[in-house]
Amino acid sequence: MYCLNLIDMMRFILSCSLLYLFLVACEGTPEEKPFIPEWTKEQSTTLNENLSREQDIRIRLYLEQRKNWDVIDTGSGLRVWVYEDHEGPTAQENDQVDVKFEVRLLNDSLIYKSEEGELSTFKVDKSDIETGVMEGIKYLSVGDKAKLIVPSHIGHGLLGDFRKIPPLEVLVIDLELVKIY
């Protein structure tokens, strides 16, 4: 009987040891905390400057292929070429305007286009329209047609428009000012 108890006790110790090893082995490596880099304002500024510089180079290369465009560089990064110019007052802040438009990428991919016979209406500087378009519309009189080259920082920025415009894209917007009221 004594031998049997010793064998049972040995089995029990062996079982416990195996169970302990199994539990320790299944535990795996402890979860590592995700690495969160420190990001400074200076790093953000540098990143933004590099992105702007890269887009400016892409725009200049685009315009190099269109030497006949008499482009105005507004200082914000926007380039405006009024290719059909009419006399008259230009659009101003708070004016309501009707426009026809076509939006393309620098590779000439068509993204959006106003429907035939339909106009888009917005209030200058008071609508949810790209900053570059708000700036560019102020160069136009009724009847004017222009190409606006809009870098992402005054267009749809880091995120795009979540539909067709990708993040960080330069837009070429063909705009016709139909009416100011």
Image (cartoon, helix red, strand yellow):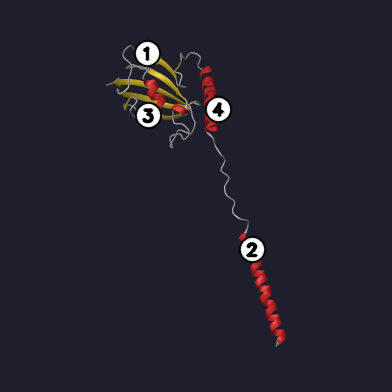
Question: Which numbered disc, 1 or 4, marks the residue that appears first in the sequence?
Answer: 4
Res 10 → quadrant? bottom right
Q: Quadrant of the N terminus?
A: bottom right
Number of numbered labels in the structure image: 4
Residue 114 drawn above or below residue 7: above
Asked which secondary structure carries label 3, the reply is loop
Instruction: Find residue 23 and name its label.
Output: none
Identify the residue at image location x=65%, y=72%: 16
Mark 2 residue type: Val
Q: In which quarter of the image is residue 38?
A: top right
Question: How far is mark 3 from mark 4, CA to CA?
Answer: 25 Å
Amino acid beneath label 3: Ile
Amino acid bearing label 4? Asn
Is 20 situated above or below 101? below
Which numbered disc flags the more N-terminal residue, 3 or 4? 4
**3 vs 2, front mark:** 2
Q: Which of marks 2 and 4 is nearer the N terminus?
A: 2
Q: Name the residue under label 2.
A: 24
Q: Residue at x 64, y 68 (%)?
A: 20
Query: Which residue sits at x=61%, y=60%?
Result: 27
Locate residue 64, reporting x and y percent: 53, 17
Left or right: where does residue 108 sit relative to residue 85? Answer: right
